[in-house]
Image (spheres, rainbow, N blue to C red):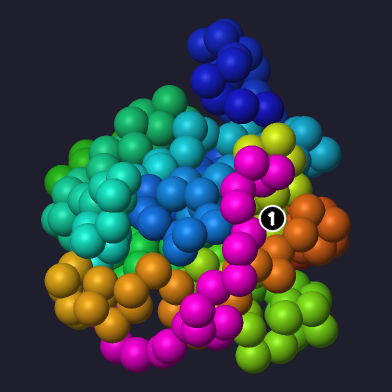
Amino acid sequence: MRLQLRTWPEVEEYLNNSTGIIIPIGSTEQHGPTGFIGTDALCPELVAHEIGKRQNVMVAPTLSIGMAQHHLGFSGSITLRPTTLIAVVCDVVNSLTRHGFNRFFFLNGHGGNIATCEAAFSEIYAESSLGITGQNRPSVRCHLENWWNSETIKEISKREYGDAEGSHATPSEVSLTYFGYPEDGARVKRDELTPRIAPRGPIYDADDFRGRFADGRMGSDPTLSTAEVGQELFEASVRSVGQAYDNFVTAR
């Protein structure tokens, strides 16, 4: 149920039965020497599209550029300012609200988006509370869910990768993209990285990040990534996120 592949009458028909929509959101940023630059957008998009098929849920176009300023020291990374991302999220929600959608389930693939998305939700609620949107606006609800949230996914990652999972360019997220895009995954060179497990540390600006994490990884060894594990993570995420979506749209 991809919004981009529907006609406007089909969207109106959908709204007769449901006012919920999934909005994948991620980032366009480096993911080490073996991970796709679009990893953080591709992961939630893959999961969202499958939920859309299985549960007859409308899925909006992926918001594929997010908060990635600290990755700008690596070629191909693109970022939005926090204020820009807040404006984008608000405009997407307000556009769809006009047509009758009122339950917005953002499926996230990038930890750096969380604070800004929550700030955007606060802006949206403030518009209603202050009467900025007028009196005919429906009761809007927004929710942010990370595709990796479930305990099952954490168990798979721990079992397969242990301490090599890390926090950026993780073998779990890279595995999921290799499952979704096997031909591209097969193209990637998986030479042993040095050090095998990348260092850990804080995040500041782009120059500092490149100095601390020379190849873009944080605490991870993504050479362990496989499409087979990616499929297992995919199924676990589709089940858990699908249930989370159902719980959200049926809650008061």
| 14 and 58: which is toward the camera | 58
Residue 29 vertical placement versus 55 (above, below): below
Q: Is residue 212 left or right of residue 32?
A: left
Tell me where residue 109 appears, x and y as whole percent: 51, 59
- Image quadrant in which you'd find residue 94: top left
Residue at (28% x, 82% y) in the render: 212
- Quarter containing the N terminus: top right
Q: Is residue 156 left or right of residue 199?
A: right
| 245 and 200: which is toward the camera | 200
Q: Is residue 157 left or right of residue 99?
A: right
Tell me where residue 73 appears, x and y as whole percent: 22, 61
Residue at (47% x, 46% y) in the render: 38
- Image quadrant in which you'd find residue 250: bottom right
Tell me where residue 210 appears, x and y as whole percent: 25, 72
Q: Looking at the magenta stretch, what is its main secondary structure? A: loop
| 68 and 88: which is toward the camera | 68
**Segment colored magenta:** 185-203
- Image quadrant in which you'd find residue 162: bottom right
- The amino acid on which the numbered mark 1 sits, given as a three-letter code, is Leu
- Circle count: 1
Task: Residue 132: tell me if it is visible.
Answer: yes
Task: Residue 239: tell me if it is visible.
Answer: no
Residue at (55% x, 57% y) in the render: 34
Residue at (59% x, 16% y) in the render: 5
- Quarter containing the C terminus: bottom right
Residue 135 vertical placement versus 6 (above, below): below
Residue 187 vertical placement versus 114 (above, below): above
| 112 and 173: which is toward the camera | 173
The residue wearing badge 1 is 176
